[in-house]
Image (spheres, helix red, strand yellow):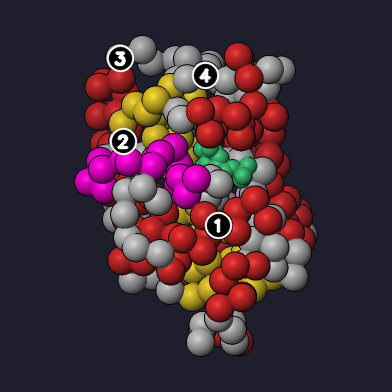
Amino acid sequence: MRIYRAKDYNDLSRKAANIISAQVIMKPDAVLGLATGSSPIGTYKQLIDWYKKGDLDFSEVKTINLDEYKGLSPEDEQSYYHFMHTNLFDHINIKQENTNIPNGREEDSEKECNRYDNVINECGGIDLQLLGIGSNGHIGFNEPGISFDKTTHCVALTENTIKANARFFISERDVPRYAYSMGIKNIMQAKSILLIASGERKADALYESLFGPITPAVPASILQLHNNVSIVADEEALSRVLADHDIISGGQIS
Ligand code: GLP
């Protein structure tokens, strides 16, 4: 695991975008696993900027998003479909048919989860999976207590996550209670993983995930067992890690 220390959110966003760009440049038909939330917005902005400058080409790239709220349609402004289009897809030359997001409108959970697992398999697996982290250590919508061998599944969101995500909705009551999410097994099968974390509110979750016991109580702690993980985090998110460890150049910790 490599941990890259960023000065602040802008620095984090540029570093993360550099890692994603390197993947796209080295493999123009890469399969990118993408995330939503506030953390990746700056990374996506930077990728759009480099695309507009002619430095990046997404014409052969495929994307598979981590999750979607169950019950929201693509037209819903709070849907992750809408988020991805507004924050990335509508500004780059990716082909719509190469983008994948769980279908929030599908009421039959088993059918949708099987379909999504097939999408991931048919793409040949994910080359680089981008992840944010919830303040309770969740990744995608894999909430504490989740079994590590789950593939795509329907999740009942925890109160903690409903509260944290309420800022994107008119009120907490409007936050959907269920979501479709790739499982930990899908995430762990990605060839490489890039986790980004910004702000003090992530400091405990990040510390526990990187240095605590590997336990379903902290879903991101499973990443300790993946052989190709990069963490890019700002100093606030790393505050607890930095109290115990030095992060030296090249992302190594001592
Ligand atoms: C949501 C998403 C996660 C994301 C998390 C953190 O619950 N499902 O994929 O990582 O929120 O969000 P933020 O980056 O806004 O803190």
Task: Work out how far the residue at label 2 is from the one at label 3, CA to CA, in angstroms.
Answer: 13 Å
The numbered disc on residue 108 is 3
For mark 2, what is the residue?
Answer: 152
Range shown magenta: 136-150
Q: Is residue 62 magenta?
A: no
Spatial CA span between label 2 and label 1: 27 Å
What amino acid is found at the position of numbered circle 2 in the picture?
Answer: Thr
Q: Position of residue 91 (x, y in %)?
A: 70, 42
Q: Main secondary structure of the magenta part?
A: loop
**Magenta segment includes 146:** yes
Going from the N terminus, do you reach mark 3 or mark 1 first? 3
Instruction: Of the two numbered discs 1 and 4 on the same chain, state the one appearing first in sequence.
Output: 4
Q: Earlier in the sequence, mark 3 or mark 4?
A: 3
Query: Which of the pair 82/6 is nearer the observer?
Result: 6
Could you tell me which secondary element the residue under label 3 belongs to? loop
Q: Which residue is mark 1?
A: 204
Q: Residues within 10 Å of mark 3 (few under 14, many from 20)?
A: few
Mark 3 against mark 4, which lies toward the viewer? 4
- Helix, strand or loop at label 4? It is loop
Q: Which residue is mark 4?
A: 176
Are there few (<14), some (14-19), or many (20+) residues within 10 Å of tag 2? many
